[in-house]
């Protein structure tokens, strides 16, 4: 978040500085030379701004769910029969670890997911890249939303944090495939972590 804020300030300063120099000190003929720099600076400002909502989602999830370390989590680029959306997915266990079948979380939004795409990969993906996802950190409830990460080089902290969510946790029209065993406490916890349910949820057990 701090690095993103620094980047935003830097690119915004460059954008404003380019306009200031072009409009205040140079003739209109230089606009052709400055145009690519201005366009790219504007693009970078937009990219930096787009990161903040996802970063806030990550922070909100981590306030209510602890990290768990997972080994050998199933993952693929192919469609998962139990997924609520199409796309690459990683399968996560229930928070309680009660032995129930895992639930896939799909990378619904592809913003900043290229790193994951290259490592989830397909048959042609290099084994050393796939091996980087053999151990994962996860915080959340896969029935609703969560944050996935890979371990740092020394293995004691998460990095490459990425926010994942079920469409049914944020979109009222999405099919709810994994809510059968959700308690009232589960749903309230997910709400506090950022899920937006529109209709009443299953009755508490």
Image (spheres, rainbow, N blue to C red):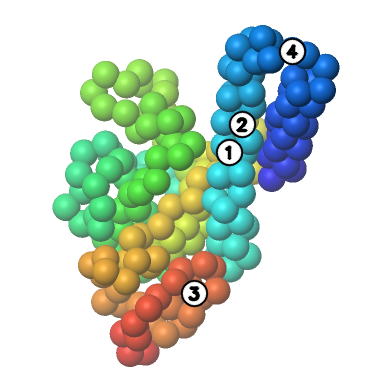
State the residue position of label 4: 27
Nearest the eye: 80 or 69: 80
Discs 4, 3 touching: Cβ within 8 Å: no
State the residue position of label 2: 42
State the residue position of label 3: 191
Nearest the eye: 58 or 180: 58
Mark 4 vs mark 1: in front: 4
Determine whether 136 is above or below 144 in the image. above
Question: Residue at image x 48%, y 43%?
Answer: 136
Instruction: List the single residue furthest toward the left.
Output: 81
Determine whether 118 is above or below 58 in the image. above
Residue 173 in picture, x, y percent from top left? 26, 69
First reached walking from the N terminus: tag 3 or tag 1: 1
- Marking on residue 46: 1
For residue 12, side relative to residue 51 (left or right): right
Q: Residues within 10 Å of mark 4 (few under 14, many from 20)?
A: few
For residue 193, side relative to residue 95 (left or right): right
Nearest the eye: 18 or 119: 18
């Amino acid at each position: 978040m701090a690095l993103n804020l620094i980047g935003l300030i830097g690119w915004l300063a460059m954008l404003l500085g380019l306009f200031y120099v072009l409009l205040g000190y140079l003739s209109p003929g230089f606009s052709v030379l400055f145009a690519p720099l201005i366009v790219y600076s504007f693009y970078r400002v937009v990219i930096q701004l787009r990161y903040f909502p996802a970063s806030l989602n990550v922070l909100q999830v981590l306030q209510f769910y602890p990290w768990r370390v997972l080994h050998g989590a199933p993952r693929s680029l192919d469609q998962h029969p139990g997924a609520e959306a199409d796309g690459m997915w990683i399968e996560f266990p229930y928070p309680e670890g009660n032995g129930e079948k895992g639930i896939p979380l799909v990378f619904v939004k592809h913003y900043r997911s290229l790193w994951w795409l290259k490592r989830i990969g397909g048959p042609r993906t290099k084994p050393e890249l796939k091996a980087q996802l053999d151990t994962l950190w996860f915080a959340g409830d896969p029935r609703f939303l969560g944050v996935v990460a890979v371990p740092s080089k020394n293995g004691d902290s998460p990095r490459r944090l990425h926010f994942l969510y079920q469409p049914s946790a944020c979109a009222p029209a999405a099919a709810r495939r994994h809510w059968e065993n959700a308690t009232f406490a589960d749903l309230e916890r997910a709400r506090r972590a950022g899920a937006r349910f529109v209709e009443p949820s299953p009755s508490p057990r």
